[in-house]
Amino acid sequence: MFSHEGPARNARSNSVLAGYLAFVAGFANAAGFVLFGAFTSHVTGNVARVSASVARGDIKGAEQAGVLVAVFLLGAVTASLLVETNLFRRTSSAYGAALLVQGGLLSAFVVTDAASLLSFAGDAYLNEMGITNRLQPDEVTKLCNTVSEPNDTPGADGLSDIDHFARFIRATKAPARDSQLASSALAMKGNALFVKIGCATCHVETLTTAPAGTKIDGGTFTIPAALGSVTFHPYADFLMHDVGTGDGILQATREHYGKKVFQMMSAYLAKQDFESSRNKIRTAPLWGVRLRPRLMHDGASLTFHDAIVRHAGEAAHVTQQFEKLKPDDQEAIIQFLKSL
């Protein structure tokens, strides 16, 4: 593939192409590892996994490794056909089609691996209320369980409780900013300092939803036009971070995911360091924060200043930067928060 096909091909172009292909191969491997807990391009290793799994009686593991090998070979054959067809037709870019297809598939992986309010609802129904549903169909225990699964079934309108719950959440709206205060010189200065000292690393101002038509939750929900490509300003990344104020409660993976999902993800989950999540807290969105009488996840902070200086762990360096500011600059940040 790196042989010279024309005058435009030289050592530099070959090096650029080699670097691109190495990056794509690494990305594909990482994507496969996240999905299956195995490196998809490690054909020899996956063939060995088939034999080892059969020897252990692990038919599911053998099937998974066998599928990875088969799909790898299918991809290699498809890419070869695309390249050879373009070479036969003497197109200007013999390898472009194969690379374009690969890029599209990788893009699909990135886009579809998304969480949603519906998946949140399904998780909450099972783990907070013990109600199984189509996304989480398995009870944690069969003790005293006398009803069929899933507990949450569609009504006359074709929607389940988790659908109604997700729709209710989508219909709620964050309070608008205090536009007068937000436009003041002090609040705008505070906004700049908020970004400068690192608060915006986790409290991200702007996010955009996936495009309309994107399928998420294993294809069970398609993002409608009203929710697709919507730009909003939550001042949060909605990710888990250890900021030194966690409750120390470790979430049990089998109970959290449900038996069926846990089995499907066992290879991936076995490699995760769940112990590190013991003190992690989801970044709280700051929109409407001025209306909250108590702050932080436990409601223990009563002022913006107290909430800021409580941040430790991953946010310790940001807290240090805040404490180094002059009192007037600290007040500017607080005024900015009061405008949200």
Image (spheres, helix red, strand yellow):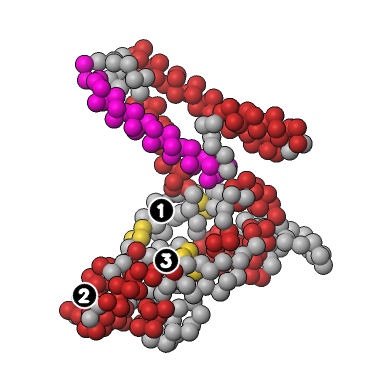
| Camera-nearest residue between 20 and 219 | 20
Does 40 appear above or below 145? above
**Percent coordinates x, y for residue 140 in the rendering:** 72, 61
Q: Earlier in the sequence, mark 3 or mark 1?
A: 1
User: In the figure, residue 329 lies in which quadrant?
Assistant: bottom left
Q: Which mark is residue 210?
A: 1
Q: Which residues are magenta?
A: 7-36
Question: Which residue type does callout 3 highlight?
Answer: Glu
* Residue 243 drawn in magenta: no
Does 320 appear above or below 263? below
**Percent coordinates x, y for residue 273 in the rendering:** 57, 56
Q: Quadrant of the N terminus?
A: top left
- In the image, what residue occupies the spot 52% across and 73% down? 246
Horizontally, is 319 left or right of 313 in the view?
left
Select label 2 or label 3 by which is in front: 3
- Which residue was labeled with disc 2? 188
Question: Which residue type does callout 1 highlight?
Answer: Ala
**Percent coordinates x, y for residue 159 in the rendering:** 60, 61
**Percent coordinates x, y for residue 37 in the rendering:** 58, 43
* Residue 34 drawn in magenta: yes
